[in-house]
Amino acid sequence: MADKHPYMSGSGGITQLTTQLRRMFPATVTADTLKKLGIAPNNETYVLNILKFIGVLDPENKKTEAATTIFNQHNDNDFQERFSVLVGQAYHELFDLHGPDAWELSTDKLIAFFRNHDGTSDIVGKRQASTFQALARISGKAVDELEPAKSSGSGHTKAARKLTSAKKVSNSTATTASPPPAPTGSGAPFPPPAPNGGAPNTGGMGLTVRIEINLPPGGNQDTYDAIFKSIRANLLNGNDNSV
């Protein structure tokens, strides 16, 4: 059986060190180097073992010839392409089993491989999987499980449909809702004035009118006749002055 695959708690240390080595790669990288850089505190040995495993450092923590060529690449795509070759060679058992799909294996499948291949515990298998995923991200190959590599589109479609449905309900409610009742009380607006100065229009329709007459005191028969004649002319006969 080959050497057990390396691991560390968390993946930030290997990512930070790789970024630092692309800027400036000393001839020898030791735990003291990492302490001075403030990278992977208390995990310096684990990070160095990972770099040794993939062939960036030799057993004496010196930069390898392969690493010199890779880390001199200024273009990100060129660096990722060459770095991925280095990782693929180091994890050849995994790629022999899964092929190029190994880059995007789920965490559970990676854990299963490392535990069965190396005979490690659950916690170590998880850290081995996390370490490989970190190297895969540096290689520009892996995608976090929360962000699938292939966009199915179904999630977006469902969200769009849900939004559309909500809009339809909102529009339907706005269309069918009854208008608010007119305000009543002292704040209610006055109704518009009736046509003809308030006189009812009796043409073509039946109308019952209740009339209260306050007769002036001391009036004679002529006064009363004049009042009733005016009522008849203006209210009953539509301004017809005939008696």
Image (cartoon, rainbow, N blue to C red):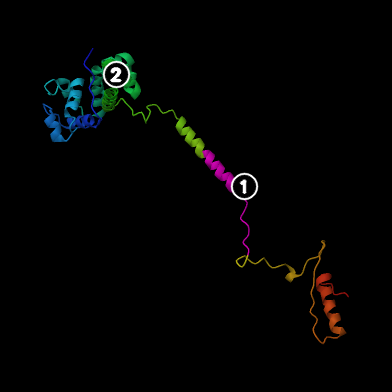
The label shown at residue 123 is: none
Please name the residue shown 23% across and 30% down the image. 15
Percent x, y of residue 185: 62, 65
Residue 192 position in % (x across, y down): 67, 66
- Against 84, residue 186 (above or below) is below
In whole angstroms, how far apart are the C-alphas of marks 1 and 2?
Answer: 63 Å
Provide the secondary structure element on which disc 1 rests: helix
Residue 183 shown left or right of residue 28 in the figure: right
Give the label, 1 or 2, closer to the camera: 2
Q: Quadrant of the N terminus?
A: top left
| Residue 168 magenta | yes
Report x, y in % for residue 194.
72, 67
Residue 123 position by quadrant: top left
Residue lying at the far right in this picture: please name it. Answer: 243
For the record, the magenta segment spans 164-184
> At which x and y percent is residue 55?
18, 20
- In the image, residue 122 sits, relative to residue 187, either above or below, namely above
Q: List the residue tagged with mark 2.
A: 115
When asked about the image quadrant of residue 78, the answer is: top left
Which residue carries the number 1 mark?
176
Left or right of residue 209, residue 120 in this image: left
Q: Quadrant of residue 236?
A: bottom right
In reply to whether residue 81 is colored magenta, the answer given is no
Amino acid residing under circle 1: Thr
What is the three-letter code of the residue carrying label 2? Answer: Arg
The mark tally for this picture is: 2
